[in-house]
Amino acid sequence: MERWMQAVYVIFITLALASHLAQAFTFPGKATIQRMQSASVVSKGLSMVIKDPVGGKVQDICVKPTAHDLATGRDPTRVKVFDTTLRDGEQSPGCTMTEEEKIAVAKQLARLGVDVIEAGFPFASPGDFKAVKRIAESVGRLENPPIICGLARALKADIEACAEAVKPAKFPRIHTFIATSDIHMEAKLKKTREQVVAITREMVGLARSLVEDVEFSAEDALRSDPDFLCEVYSVAIEAGATTINVPDTVGYTTPDEFYALMHKLRAGVRGIDQVTISVHGHDDLGMAVANFLAAIEGGARQVECTINGIGERAGNAALEEVVMALNVRKAHYNPAFGRATDDERALTNVNTREIYKTSRLVSSMTGMMVQPNKAIVGANAFAHESGIHQDGVLKNKRTYEIMDAETVGLDDNLLVLGKHSGRAAFRARLTELGYEMAEEELMRAFSRFKVLADVKKEITNMDLEAIVNDEIRADVNDRFKLDTIQVLCGDANIPTATARILDTQTGSEIVTNSIGTGPVDAAFKCILEAVKVQDVKLQEYAVSSVTAGIDALGEVTVRLLDLTSGKVFFGRASNTDVVVASAQAYINACNRVQISRETLPVKPLHPQRDSGV
């Protein structure tokens, strides 16, 4: 690393700490620095102990700038946001994404400004390995890229595969883990404490020999013996871990317990002030975000989240909720960073104006709809039904709104194009929205745009996003393509559907007819007869409107349960005609079932259930 960059950061950190000291005297009763250690800012790091006399909160905060901080100009005193949507989020039933979908999400996460993208579990399957590697090659080599991370069990083969997958990135990271709770060690690993410590030392050491940036997680940390946990983390740090992660694997803990554990670790883990403390949590008891905020007050400086809170069981801590809590309540959390309560500096590197767009993209790529009352990104998050509330908001928005919709990107749905707009304007607008498309994809999307423009007077950004997302979801390997669908229905008719479907494998056209209890049911039966996908069950069918108005695009999500494997596959499509969108979504889901049966005869490994240690 160039010496001038190191010098700049030494000056930056020195001034920052001097500012903290000044604040301690200017704002009595707020956070004060008791002790400051500084040696070489690169080799030995920099840390400070912050005490809040009011709350009695003492923490040893590592503010050592990493190579990633130095190269990308990120403030090392902020909370690092580690997004695991592509790994833990994808483990939600029915959320499996294709390679192209994962790359699209990763690119948007980079625009969002997350510090770390956990791109997947490379050893799980050849497809996972390839997806992680492609993300490392593309997103990981942007001008100011995020760290690209891969997950690996504490196994030699896992770690070596992970290192190979993330190697193309400018800033690669290996995230390895082993369980430390008694129940996991005894029931799952069949290992003693001594064996777990030995494996930790060996595998973290192996990972560090392959990459400079290593994260170690003690799975089920919140149900582990705290003293044993301290020993395991100490060994991991001694072996070369640069980040230690504290996972609430089953969403069992409470904010007070998480806060207390942070202090226990700071007091009992050797070398703790030289690494970043990270937290990972699930929402089984609905407290994941609250737990994270308590952990941050206790000194955690990396949070592992997912967009929309997707993840196994009840999901993970929602990135948008953690980030906006820190953004809106800066005055409350500033003291934990040694700042004055009125300090307006951001506490994360996330560009909040990209939050809503990222939420919609992830929802579209995974088929996981966002509930209307979801905090920050739900359809009702900034809506007011009560007359009293509406009156108050009209007089002064701050009466009932604690944040502006604009701060999360909800002011961007503007009229941008019309039916007379050309391909150049279409491409330019997509570029502004952050989409990069190959010429063939662009032409398909532009053709759909022209069709939509003929039936819809106002084309908004959300319409464009729906069109492009449909193209991203479209897999060139799909065997069956919907050509036409016609439905006859009414209160005096039996709903009847006729479909023409192209079989790309044989080049033939298949025409089928069917009756049903309604137009959608008839269309689905037509498709099922044509594609001959057996042993599937419709698990979910949902329709939502992309924008307002009678001519709005309807977005349909379909989930099919594959009765042979137990896996859930989704399809999603948008059209101004809901029946057409439904048919397209259904055939998309059928294609995914068929591809899975043909290409994945062996079920991919699961990082927790297939412990292998």
Image (cartoon, grey):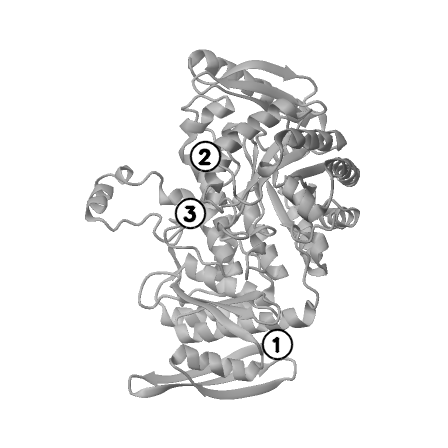
Q: Nearer the viewer, residue 454 or 380?
A: 380
Identify residue type, mark 2.
Leu
**Labels 2 & 3 near each other (Cβ < 8 A):** no
Q: Position of residue 463 (x, y in %)?
A: 42, 62
Query: Is residue 1 at all visible to an observer of this figure?
Result: no
> Can residue 568 be spotted in the picture?
yes
Amino acid tagged 3: Gly
Residue drawn at (50%, 44%), measured in percent from left and top?
317
Write down the residue under mark 2. Answer: 326
The residue that label 1 is drawn on is 479
Q: Whole-percent x and y of residue 47?
A: 62, 21
Name the residue furthest top. Answer: 25
Above or below 274: residue 583: below
What is the C-alpha distance between the residues marked 2 and 3? 17 Å
**Three-letter amino acid code of the residue under disc 1:** Arg
| Dot label at residue 409 | 3
- Report the residue at 48% width, 34% height from top: 255
Horizontally, residue 359 falls left or right of residue 14, namely left
What residue is shown at x 43% (from left), y 18% (from top)? 54
